[in-house]
Amino acid sequence: MNRRNFLKALTTTIVGSSIAPMETLSKFAKETSSLQWNGGDIIIEDYLKKIEGAKLGQTDLNLILKNDKGIKPPYNIQSIQNQSIQTKPQAIPQKKPLPILENEDNPPVGVSNNHNIAEKAQPIETPSENIAVHKSKEEILNEYIKKMRAFNKSHMDDLYLDGKEFQLLKSSAIKIMRLKKVVGHGNFYLLSFDEALKIARTYPSLKNFTKREINFLEKLFYMDASIFGFFDKKPLRSLTHRIKKRKVVKVSRTGNYLFKGLPVKMYKKIKKDAGRQAVLTSGVRSVMKQFQLYLNKAYQSNGNMSLASRFLAPPGYSYHGVSDFDIGQKGYGVHNFTERFTRTEVFKRLENLDYISLRYTEDNLLGVRFEPWHIKVDPRA
């Protein structure tokens, strides 16, 4: 493809995107198999003229200019004019997902070291405010619902980790997976953050968490999840939150725990009313357990934190840490965590129970996929 056609395709991608131009450029270059991005073939003035009005940082410009022959950074960023551009969103190519690290509530298992992780990750960056899309409230709502129904696909305004943070995500997820194997499946549900760090330091078979990994996990926990499109409340405010064993009970033949009191009472009532086929598929989850699930999904999604947050609650935001639990049908396996669960006899019986509320209903406005299995224990929460 010649330079003119390349620039034309590049411009179409950038103008049609609602995210930062440099991120779009990276996506375009790395995801479009029919093109090769050769910085030496791009004349920077042409590039700037094509995307005039888009907001670029000085670092972004320098990255482009570094590969452009005959022009040396830094470029005068003041030459870029800020203006609104009415755009029509363009579809972006879908990435091939990485394998998830562990089979926990989601299939399958396997860690692969054959990936160039840095090239698959994109920077966390808020959508460009300089690209205005004029839409009605109804159009915005319809687009949101459409996105949520395609929760497991990448979308143009999704936010990604950069290469360094993606590496930290991967290394942290692997260490958490190994930690779970040491403490055991059941104990891991109750394991606190401080206990996890202590065990990692104590056992020779485990590698200690580095300071950078700890800082990364802390940053992720205390980050406002709304930037990823997750809008539910945060029941756990502290990274070091601890679940006291005297406040939970282990449910036989499930490997899961429930909080004593209302959760146990509700589960027993569901078992009685929904039949013997109803089974507890997930109960109490500590901060570390939620980290394990969330990091695995983010890794499998190439660092797409928005996609991971549509799929399940970020650490600290899960109501499994205070009361909620999941119900499935015996023998239905991983399908209990999909919309296929709505076809089961157990779900049909749940629908007829007036005391049952779902935490994440169909087409909810909380930024989370429909979870017909997720029982909301306290209707006030």
Image: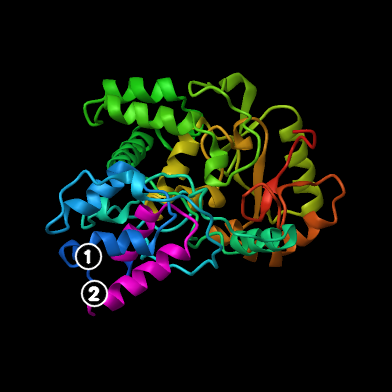
Image coords of residue 35 (percent x, y): 26, 73
Asked if the stretch drawn in magenta spans residue 12, the answer is: yes
Asked if the stretch drawn in magenta spans residue 64, the answer is: no
**Amino acid identity at mark 2:** Arg
Compared to 215, does 28 lie above or below? below
Q: Element under label 2?
A: helix
Q: Which residue is rendered at x = 37% and y = 45% of the image?
A: 161
Q: Element under label 1?
A: loop
Q: Which residue is rendered at x = 64% and y = 60% of the image?
A: 134
Left or right placement of residue 285 versus residue 99 in this view? right
Image coords of residue 110 (percent x, y): 32, 55
Left or right placement of residue 265 versus residue 230 in this view? right
**Amino acid identity at mark 1:** Ile
Q: Is 37 in front, or is 319? A: 37
Q: Residues within 10 Å of mark 1 (few under 14, many from 20)?
A: some
Q: Are marks 1 and 2 in contact (CB under 8 Å)?
A: yes
Q: Which labelled disc corresponds to residue 3? A: 2
Image coords of residue 373 (percent x, y): 67, 52
Disc 1 to disc 2, how far (Cα)? 7 Å
Left or right placement of residue 125 versus residue 84 in this view? left
Compared to 305, does 349 lie above or below? below
Q: Quadrant of the C terminus?
A: top right
Left or right placement of residue 192 versus residue 330 in this view? left
Task: Give the extent of the magenta segment.
Answer: 1-30
- Determine the main secondary structure of the stretch shown in magenta: helix
Which is more N-terminal, label 2 or label 1? 2
Q: Which labelled disc corresponds to residue 42? A: 1
